[in-house]
Structure formats: structure tokens, C-alpha cells
Amino acid sequence: MATKGYIDTYRQVCNILEDIRKGVFRPVYLLMGEEPYYPDMVCEAILKNCLQEWEKDFNEIVCYGADVDADTVITAARRFPMMAERQLVVVKEAQVMKTLEDLAVYCQKPLDSTVLVIVLHGATVDKRKALYKSVLKMGVVLESPALRDYEVPQWISSYYQERGLQIDPEAAQLLAEAVGTDLSTIAVETEKLLKNLPEGTVSVGSEDIEKNVGISRQFSVFELTRALAYGDAPKALKVAFHIGQAPRFAMPMGVSALFMYFYRILKYEALLRDNPKPDAGAKAKILAVNPFFYKEYEAAVRLYPLPRCMRIISLLNEYDYKGKGGASPETAPGELFVELVTKILNI
């Protein structure tokens, strides 16, 4: 993830959820970040566990940033609970509050009998200002940055493991390619998948993803990079053509995937220069992929030595520009993508 590894974020979430299940609540929660999956998860857990059902009528307030200002929220938070140990005040979509920073006045001295939850959707507060600093001191700050593309398959594997399932590395890669970096979408697609799998299934393969998520492994970026790694030009061009014809295809997306792939090859090449026989730990640190794919990268390094790899990366920068409007308007994105792959094969 951006500011810290997604594993660290996941561990923090687990600790927060464990406290919630035990009935241990902090006076203020600031839940924020580009990726809303974990902030939403923590917010829902608090809503579910903070109060008994019969306590909620008088002690639970859920409002939205577009409808309230800081004074209204502070007034609500400073009330005392009615016939309950605590009250709960939740502000969703807080990033649209014009007076959001003014909540710092309350957060510096929050009531022990109030649980105030401030949820920002796809946004963060300024860490230099008082709101962030006061919540960090008096409560809990959860920041959930977006995952990078290459981190998604490993997140999927961990997510499935939590559910008591094993997912093949190829299947995780395929699912990541199908749904992108939105963790909520991955969770939704997983729920759909599980409903269609036979009861008692413990292992998920590429065929399951193809059948239930609606993506063809045969014509995926994963298959394209594999074909490029082994110098299989006919297959690479065939896959590139089909990728370019997909309804949701966008040239920047295709170029980004190829750039990340060749950037890893470049990093792996640099590692091999210093250490011709790196151990699994060194490979994992450089490649950041499942060990299942190590052989593919070893083949790619042999086929794309440093000078060739650098020329390809330069070519990708050129086509990134073209794909964002620098190409002639009559060139379709799919045609441009096939042209790019052709040039990569002939460099």
C-alpha cells in the first residue's frame, strides 16, 4: 500500500475488530483512506456491536457530511446517553463537511460516554492539522490507502485464506485482472463465486474464476505477459488483439500492466547482477509476486537483457502518451495496443 504495507493495515484492522468484539471502544475513530473497504468494515462493526438493539433508538445517531456541520456533530457528541452505558455518533461521508476540521475542538477532550466515528470515503484529512493529531492522541486513526496493482493478487490469496479457501496463484491473478484494485468489488465477486461453487469447496482455480466472474484466462494480460516472457509472438499478438477488443479496454490500463511487468524484469536483472543465485527471500522482495511465477521471470530476464528492456520501457512511455491522446484520432485503442506489442516483440 502507499504509506504502509497492506499487511500492516490488515493487522491494525484485526486488532480494532477484536477490541470491538470484546466491547472495548475508544472515544473517537477517524476512518479514512483511498480504499474504503476497511474503513467501511470497521464502521459497520461499530454500528453492530457498540449498542444493544433496544439502546439504539435514543443513543445512536448516524448522519452524513453533506447534511451536518461541526457544531451539530459536537452538540450531539456532548450529550449523555439515555439508559445506556454509551451513545454512538457516526458521521459518514465526512470528507464533504466544510467544517470538518472544527471537530478537533471536541476530539481534544472527548466524552468517555460517547463513541464518535468519523468516516471519510476515498479521502484523508490533513495530518498536519489538529483533527488528525487529536484523534491520534485520544482515539483511533485508521488510514487505508489503495493497493497497488501488483499487491492485489496477494491480498486476494489472503482474503480467500480467511474464508477457509485456497486460491491458485493464476486464479488470484485472473480475478485481480478482472476487477482491479477495488477491494469491495473483489468481496462482492467472491460472494457471487461462492454461491455458485459446490458446497464443501476448499480450492478455487482459474476455471472457477473464468466461469463465474466472466473473464477468459486465454485472453488476459496475464497470458500476454507469459507469451512475451517465452517469446511466443503468435500467441502474444493473438492475446493482445482480443484484449484490445474488450468493451472496457483502455490503452493506459494495458500500458500500465506491461510497464509494471518489464519494470520487475529490470529490477530482477539488477538483482542477478549482484547475486547470480538469489534465494527465495531476495526474489520475493524484488518481484513482489507469488513464487509460482518465478520461472516465468527467469525466462523473461534471459529474453530481455538490460539494453532491450530499457528500450521497451522507453517504448511504453511513448505509447502511454499516445494512449492518453497523443496518437492520431483515427487509431483505435485496440489497434494501438497490438502495434505496441508488435514493437516489443521486434525490439
Image (cartoon, rainbow, N blue to C red):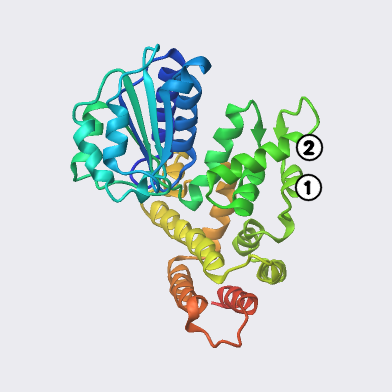
User: Would residue 248 be found to the left or right of residue 273 on screen?
Assistant: right
Of label 2 and label 1, which has the lower sequence position?
Answer: 2
- Residue 183: quarter of image: top right
Q: Position of residue 103 (x, y in %)?
A: 25, 38
- Residue drawn 45% across the image and 70% down it: 313
User: Would residue 159 be found to the left or right of residue 106 on screen?
Assistant: right
Quarter of the image containing the N terminus? top left
For label 1, the SS is: helix
Instruction: Depth check: give the residue in front, 321 or 108.
Output: 108
Say which mark, if any, is on residue 329: none
Q: Position of residue 173 (x, y in %)?
A: 61, 48
- Residue drawn 66% across the image and 29% down it: 165
Label 2 belongs to which residue?
Answer: 196
In the image, residue 109 sits, relative to residue 346, either above or below, namely above
Label 1 belongs to which residue?
Answer: 211
In the image, residue 149 sits, relative to residue 53, either above or below, namely below
- Residue drawn 71% across the image and 61% down it: 219
Q: Identify the amino acid type marked 1.
A: Lys
Instruction: Depth check: give the residue in front, 166 or 324.
Output: 324
